Image (tube, helix red, strand yellow):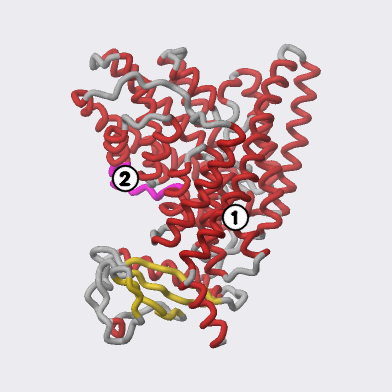
Amino acid sequence: MKNNTSYTIKRAQRFPVILIGEGLLTGAAGGLLVLLYRVALTYGGRWLGFILEYISGHPVRIFAWFLALLAMACIVGRLVKWEPMISGSGIPQVEGEVTGKFIQKWEKVLPAKFIGGFLCMFAGLSLGREGPSIQLGAMTGKGISRLFGREKTEERFLMTCGASAGLAAAFHAPLAGMMFALEEIHKGFSVSIMISVMTASVTSDYICSHIIGLDPVFRFTLKEALPQNYYWLLLLLGIICGAMGVFYNWAMLKIQDLYKKPKFLNETERLILAFMAAGILGLIMPSVLGSGHELIVTLTEGKMVLSLIILTFIVKFLFSAVSFGSGAPGGIFFPLLILGAMIGGGFAMIGVRLFGLDPIYINNFILLAMAGYFTAIVRAPITGIILLFEMSGSVSQLLSLSVVSVTAYIVATLLKSEPIYESLLDRILQNQGKKPVSTVKGSGQKVLDAFPIMNGSVLAKKRVQDINWPDNCLLVALERDGKELIPKGKTQLMTGDVLTVMTDERDAGYMHDKMEKLCYTSY
């Protein structure tokens, strides 16, 4: 036991060097896998377009397509039963494992998520590629950890690196991939993890860019930066995005409840409903199928009038809820950006009519609303700002992006809406009937985690011996001003200190939540 503890601490001390190499390997492997997934989805979208054109006006062909949709729904249902962790986005699952709340089987998640996600997108469900890409990347990192026999602490770092690589490969957004992995998945910053995550993200993006090019995901032109005399409209747009984001979170959770209410519906039958809805919409309004990338092109090229924007938003919103609520393997990231674009386009067109807004700024508001809507829903404003300027290729909107995002964040917070991925993680734990993590049997491995003491923390200016530490955890190191100290009972903690805490694997989730409260809040 003593030797194992000593070895774990020594590995932690060498993390800055070790993790750079492991981040490079994880970024390369995760990037290649997600690139393959992205290419598969691209072909799936093309095939769907060919099929819808081929069956149009032919009842027999339409019937055959619906039979194919039924078969695909059954296959995805079997995959979800085989590995329940592939259901939904995948981001809450990664976040839950990184914080020690449950364990995924990477060797099952990888093939099941890849195949299930492809079939859902091929069928036209309104889902995104980012959630599966992040989960695929994270499970690649976990697989590398297991293949090389790494300790649990390193494994979680590699999962964070893989998540970063997955988002970078999915959206050609390396900075956003790094920031999302730290802000949403890992929920913490340190020099060692930041450098390794950045290495994974840049490696993944380089591989994808080398193969499929450097073009941004959203290709539309912003003719001019928004003048400051229009900034009052940004506050109004931020308020609308914040309120609409709160409604989005409520609706996504509500539709999950509605799906589960009828006791006679199992996993496969819920998926059949979503796949049949995709088949019907493919006949009457195919523009809302899939992630919705073509809607952005149509909107930004000025080919949509206000009434069509409103109709498309309503149908896309409802179809997204039906698709995601069914438990289908797929994300909400990209579809919510499309919905945000619709909000921005509609808002700008109304602004042209009522407030004399120059029409050349309509595309500016489309971009800004995407960031604001994302921030209100996910509650990750830095990621939203970076993601949108990377995906659009425009760096002239950072100030206006910040105004809209911060306003939306404040509105969503004041309306007491929980971030969507945290709500989804709570539901996964509830659905699994999870016991407190401290009672769950683990492998007996030791886990290290680092927590910075934030301004206003209850720990600041207190001695180590005077603090009521969580059960079954050991404070093993303290970093202050770049120097590592061995904490003693009389050591006084200060704001900015980074605490390294060790616990058993089975207690990791419990300890993580307790330490976050101690380090981040004052009560």
Residue visible at 53% across and 42% down in the picture: 205
Where residue 246 sits: x, y (%)? Answer: 38, 41
Residue visible at 46% across and 16% down in the picture: 308
- Is the residue marked by circle 2 packed among few (<14), some (14-19), or many (20+) residues within 10 Å? few
Q: Earlier in the sequence, mark 1 or mark 2?
A: 1
> Which part of the image, by quadrant, shows the C terminus?
bottom left
Where residue 251 sits: x, y (%)? Answer: 47, 39
Please say whether residue 353 is visible from this viewpoint: yes
Q: Secondary structure at mark 2?
A: loop
Numbered circle sitting on residue 25: 1
Pick out the residue farthest to the left: 229
Evaluate if marks 1 and 2 touch, with contact meaning CB atoms under 8 Å apart. no
The answer to whether residue 29 is above or below residue 472 is: above
Residue visible at 49% across and 52% down in the picture: 199
- Left or right: where 488 falls relative to 296: left
Tell me which amino acid carries mark 1. Answer: Leu
Q: Nearer the viewer, residue 464 or 67?
A: 464
Residue under numbered circle 2: 415
The residue mark sitting in front, 1 or 2, is: 1
Where residue 497 sits: x, y (%)? Answer: 30, 70
Please say whether residue 430 is visible from this viewpoint: no
Q: Secondary structure at mark 1?
A: helix
Magenta run includes residue 150: no
Kindly report the distance in space between the C-alpha atoms of the residues bearing marks 1 and 2. Answer: 43 Å
Query: What stretch of residues is rendered in magenta?
Result: 409-420
Tell me which amino acid carries mark 2. Answer: Leu
The answer to whether residue 303 is above or below residue 381 is: above
Residue visible at 48% across and 70% down in the picture: 14
Magenta run includes residue 414: yes
Numbered circle sitting on residue 175: none
- Is the residue marked by circle 1 packed among few (<14), some (14-19), or many (20+) residues within 10 Å? many
Q: Nearer the viewer, residue 188 or 10?
A: 10
